[in-house]
């Protein structure tokens, strides 16, 4: 692919990949807005499958991991920042297990400092951290979601609840459009939000170790950030928890 215009339509690609997968074998990790998954749920039969989007999801998807929301109740950018209605469509209509990696966990875990300080200069992930955060360790929203998607609970995570389900407020309900509220329903046991078993600082260290392993195993021959001056302090600091909605943007 040489041009962005050659990229697959995301819903079509979802349908193609799901149709070709074994039943109950696919893990989907969402680390942004949910409009593509909403489009999948709205899709109908095509050349890849006679099943509708919801039927494909029910048949093929083992688990959905969503970086979004703030638990048990809160206001988070991935849910309200684009279109709260597409968020609600997915959250309220997904048929299958969902695990949420929320703001409160990601904002409490800082990572990326050791990679910026000591990682290979040719590593593109190191370059992205430097150009985005200027050598400051970064909140770990998406990396936590991806780590769970790859490795499951393992020794790092536990669920913060035993039952219930997520819901999204719309039309300014309770003064909020796009907030998430956990409904404690004992009949629903396939939705959870994540907590860490390790403590925030140790989970950040686990992420940093994996970043360094990945960078060392895929060294490149050119330096994507050139000779940028080194500034700032890459050592992880103890993060605070951010509670005001005005601070709930990950941009």
Image: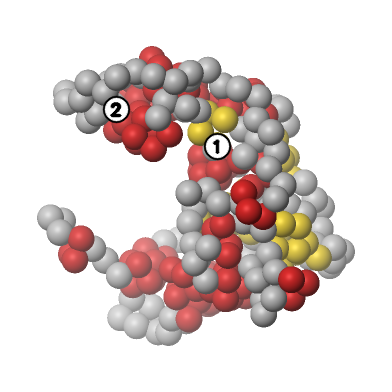
Image height of 57 relative to 171, above or below: above
Quadrant in which the N terminus appears: bottom left
State the residue at coordinates (22%, 30%).
224
- Badge 1: residue crowd in 10 Å (few <14, some 14–19, many ≥20): many
**Nearer to me, 209 or 136:** 136
The residue at which mark 2 appears reads as 123
Residue 133, image x, y percentages: 43, 34
| Number of residue marks | 2
The residue at which mark 1 appears reads as 139
Mark 1 residue element: strand
Residue 3 is left or right of residue 115, and the answer is: left
**Nearer to me, 111 or 53:** 111
Q: Label 1 to label 2, Cα distance in Å?
A: 19 Å
Residue furthest out toward the front: 246
Q: Is residue 77 visible?
A: yes
Residue 21, image x, y percentages: 41, 61
Colour pattern of the rendering? secondary structure
Q: Which mark is residue 117?
A: none
Mark 2 residue element: loop
Residue 96, image x, y percentages: 63, 65
Residue furthest out toward the left: 2
Residue 162, image x, y percentages: 82, 52
- Badge 2: residue crowd in 10 Å (few <14, some 14–19, many ≥20): many
State the residue at coordinates (35%, 67%).
10
Q: Is residue 168 visible?
A: no
State the residue at coordinates (77%, 62%).
182
């Amino acid at each position: 692919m040489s041009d962005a215009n050659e990229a697959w339509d995301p819903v079509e690609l979802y349908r193609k990949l799901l149709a070709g997968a074994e039943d109950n074998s696919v893990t989907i990790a969402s680390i942004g807005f949910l409009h593509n998954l909403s489009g999948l749920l709205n899709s109908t039969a095509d050349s890849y499958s006679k099943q509708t989007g919801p039927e494909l999801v029910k048949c093929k998807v083992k688990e959905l991991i969503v970086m979004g929301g703030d638990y048990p109740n809160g206001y988070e950018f991935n849910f309200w920042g684009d279109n709260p209605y597409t968020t609600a469509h997915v959250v309220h209509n997904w048929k299958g297990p969902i695990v949420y990696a929320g703001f409160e966990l990601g904002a409490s875990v800082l990572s990326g400092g050791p990679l910026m300080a000591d990682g290979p200069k040719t590593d593109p992930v190191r370059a992205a951290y430097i150009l985005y955060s200027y050598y400051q360790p970064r909140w770990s929203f998406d990396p936590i979601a991806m780590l769970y998607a790859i490795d499951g609970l393992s020794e790092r995570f536990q669920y913060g609840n035993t039952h219930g389900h997520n819901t999204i407020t719309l039309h300014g309900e309770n003064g909020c459009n796009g907030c998430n509220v956990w409904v404690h329903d004992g009949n629903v046991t396939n939705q959870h939000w994540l907590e860490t078993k390790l403590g925030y600082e140790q989970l950040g260290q686990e992420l940093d170790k994996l970043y360094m392993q990945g960078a060392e195993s895929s060294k490149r021959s050119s330096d994507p950030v050139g000779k940028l001056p080194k500034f700032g302090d890459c050592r992880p600091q103890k993060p605070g928890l951010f509670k005001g909605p005005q601070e709930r943007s990950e941009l």
